[in-house]
Image (cartoon, rainbow, N blue to C red):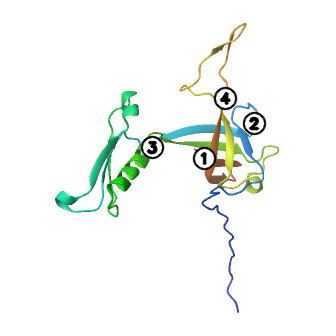
Amino acid sequence: MRPDYVTVEVHHGVEGQPQIPQAVQRVWDATRPAGNIVDAKVTTDASKMYTRSWATGAGEDADILMDVRQNTAAHAAGLPLMEQTKSYQSVTQHGTLLDHIDADLAAAARPAVQWQVTADACAPGTRPVTDWRVGDRVTLVVPPTRSYARLEDGPDRPAPPAGREVLATTIAADYDMATEAVTVKMQED
């Protein structure tokens, strides 16, 4: 007479250790020609980048708490003037408002870089459903991109650019049984 039910156990980190503990450190190599990583695409979200931040705090009319800060180093390096405004209605102290503005500027100095990796779920040694889970940290070896690829002179001839290692956290995974592929979205740390 009891209805069917499902029990779900959720693991998450704490403030001192936000990551889910994992048994081994994963290394996914997207540069190997016959590897299990079929494709790797990078996306960068620069929508939250700015060099000047305006912020308001508590108050009304002429008594409203307000200030502005600017990332002068980024602006001097050639980044255009991009502004954003934010409201912190519960902030009543000027020093606290400046701390919020400084934190916003620090976060806006670097865009979020995400990777979309497609893995062959049937490659030898690959068990994505049981070997890893969303939230795991992965060392992703990616091929060179135009932003940093340059030939290095060797003793005889120039050497091709090498791949680079990126530490990323898996944030989503999509399994496609029709194509036997796993599409994993990751974000660089």
Give the residue type at disc 3.
Ala
Identify the image quadrant of the C terminus: top right
Q: Residues within 10 Å of mark 4 (few under 14, many from 20)?
A: some
What is the quadrant of residue 145 in the picture?
Answer: top right
Q: Residues within 10 Å of mark 2 (few under 14, many from 20)?
A: some
Contact, mark 3 vs mark 1 (Cβ under 8 Å): no
Give the residue type at disc 4.
Gly
Q: Which residue is mark 3?
A: 106
What is the quadrant of residue 160 in the picture?
Answer: top right
* Residue sitting at x 67%, y 39%: 140
**Residue 163 circle label:** 4
Q: Position of residue 80 (x, y in %)?
A: 34, 32
What is the quadrant of residue 76 in the picture?
Answer: top left
Question: How far apart are the two marked residues, 4 and 1, measured between alpha carbons?
Answer: 18 Å
At numbered mark 4, what does the secondary structure look like: helix, strand or loop? loop
Q: Which residue is mark 2?
A: 35
At numbered mark 2, what does the secondary structure look like: helix, strand or loop? loop
Question: How far apart are the two marked residues, 3 and 1, measured between alpha carbons?
Answer: 22 Å
- The outermost residue toward the left is 62
Give the residue type at disc 2.
Gly
Q: Position of residue 64 (x, y in %)?
A: 23, 58
